Amino acid sequence: MISGNHDASWFLRAGIDVVKEICNKRKDLTYLGQMGAYVNINNIKVYMIHGLGSPSYAISYKSQKLVEGFSSENKPNMLLVGHFHSNFVAFMRNIFVCHPGSFQGQTPMLRRLAIFPVIGGYLIEIEINKTGFTRFKYEFLPCFNPKLNDR
């Protein structure tokens, strides 16, 4: 897993990477770094990134810019984009792109930014062969009862 902007606030205040500390105490979690990391799963290159800034008018825009910016040697097969509290799936430039959703309800800050988070996550099944992906199957599992003023 990677850390995000909320985790970075602890790092800036006290020099503690809370995600790294959690991963150090749990054998089932692997810390990959702050804000972004590549991971290879059965020869599938996955890039996870915790985005920056407010979401754009079009949910896909920031991911489109990320996809356009990958050089051929750094281009992943799958891009997972966090931070925007949205769900989105696309296949662009031969990259499976996913905004995985959020597990936090609307905070006062999100309300000020006019963002209502999509709460839930994806269950993703992937079939691969020696050359890469052969099939994607995904299902979004929503939460319809968010916690008000979540922190």
Image (spheres, rainbow, N blue to C red):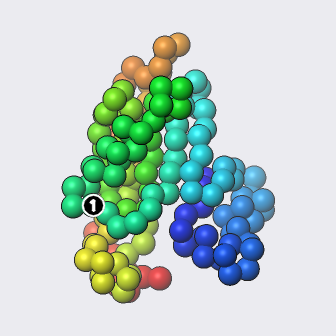
User: Which residue is the extreme one toward the left?
Assistant: 57
In this view, 135 is above or below 140: above
Which residue in the rendered view is the most extreme toward the right?
24
Q: Amino acid at mark 1?
A: Ser
For the question of whether residue 3 can be seen, the reply is: yes
- The residue located at (59%, 32%) in the rendering is 41
Q: Residue at x 45, y 46 (%)?
A: 80
Residue indicated by mark 1: 56
Q: In the shown orientation, is residue 57 left or right of residue 94? A: left
Place of residue 133 in the rendered image (x, y in percent of width and height, measured from the top left): 43, 23
Say whether residue 97 is left or right of residue 77.
left
* Residue nearest the observer in this picture, 88 or 119: 88
Disc 1 crowd rating (10 Å Cα; few below 14, some 14-19, many 20+) is: few
Q: Residue at x 36, y 27 (%)?
A: 94
Indicate left or right for 47 with 106 as reference.
right
Quarter of image, res 95:
top left
150, above or below 33, in the image: below
**In percent of the image, x 39 and y 20: which residue is there?**
134
Give the quarter of the image for residue 55.
bottom left
- Could you tell me residue 47's position as x and y percent? 52, 41
Residue 12, percent across and down?
66, 76
